[in-house]
Image (spheres, rainbow, N blue to C red):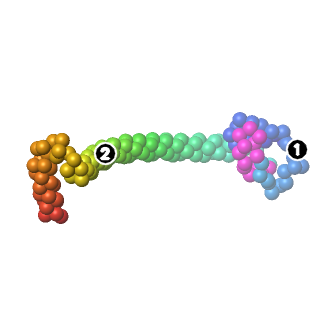
Amino acid sequence: MIITCPCEKKQFKIDSSLIPNEGRELQCGSCERIWFYKPQNESEASLTLNNNISINKIEQNNEVKEKNLEISKTSQEEKIIEFEIEKENLKTVKKSEGKKTKLFSYLLVSIISFIALIILVDTLKTPLINVFPGLEATLFNLFETLQDIKLFIIDLI
């Protein structure tokens, strides 16, 4: 007997003794589709009619699958676009945060270095005054300015 795959791309010649009257599942070697086949003793006209019905169902299923695939592709494209936008926004936020963090770090290091320099100069005040006579008044004013800044920061907190 000759059996045609539902996709109608392939026909198979199968020994009729291999298929019982109750029918059995068959698999197409071309498209890998599995379907249930039951031998029929009906006329060719009804067989053609059933074949046309199954073709219409297959076409309808294919149309539905194509629509679902288009919707799926569209939603995937939208998700990819949303992901790219989120990634760009995250990069922008990280860049702005990075600039702020760098600026704050530089400012903090500069302040600490300046204070360390003042402490060093104050420690070596006596030998430096012998070399630079006006240094004592400058250091005193600088020390008073630091005291004022310290009080200002304490008042802010």
Residue shown at 58% from the left, 42% from the top: 62
Q: Amino acid at mark 2?
A: Lys
Residue 125: x and y in percent read 20, 50
Query: What SS does tag 2 mark?
Result: helix
Secondary structure category for the residue under label 1:
loop
Query: In terms of depth relative to the viewer, which is nearer, 154 or 29?
Result: 154
Q: Quadrant of the N terminus?
A: top right
Taking the magenta stretch, the answer to whether it contains residue 36 is: yes
Q: Residue at x 24, y 50 (%)?
A: 124
Horizontal relation, residue 34 to residue 148: left or right? right
Let me know if residue 49 appears in the view.
Answer: no
How many tags in the picture? 2
Where is residue 151, by image quadrant?
bottom left
Instruction: Specify the quadrant of the image occupied by residue 11.
Output: top right
Q: In which quadrant will I find the C terminus?
A: bottom left
Tell whether position 109 is magenta. Answer: no
Q: Position of residue 117 (x, y in %)?
A: 25, 48
- At a point 15% along the width and 54% down the height, the residue shown is 143
Q: Nearer the viewer, residue 79 or 72?
A: 79
Q: Which residues are magenta?
A: 27-40
Q: Is residue 103 left or right of residue 138?
A: right
Q: CA distance from mark 1 to mark 2?
A: 81 Å
Q: What predominant SS class does the magenta segment belong to? A: loop
Sequence-first disc among 1 and 2? 1
For mark 1, what is the residue? Answer: 15
To which residue does mark 2 refer?
102
**Does residue 45 appear to the left or right of 125 in the view shown?**
right
Classify mark 1: residues with Cα within 10 Å, few (<14), some (14-19) or many (20+): few
* Type of the residue with mark 1: Asp
Percent across and percent down for residue 106 are 28, 45
Q: Residue pushed farthest top? A: 9
Does any portion of residue 86 appear in the rendered image?
yes
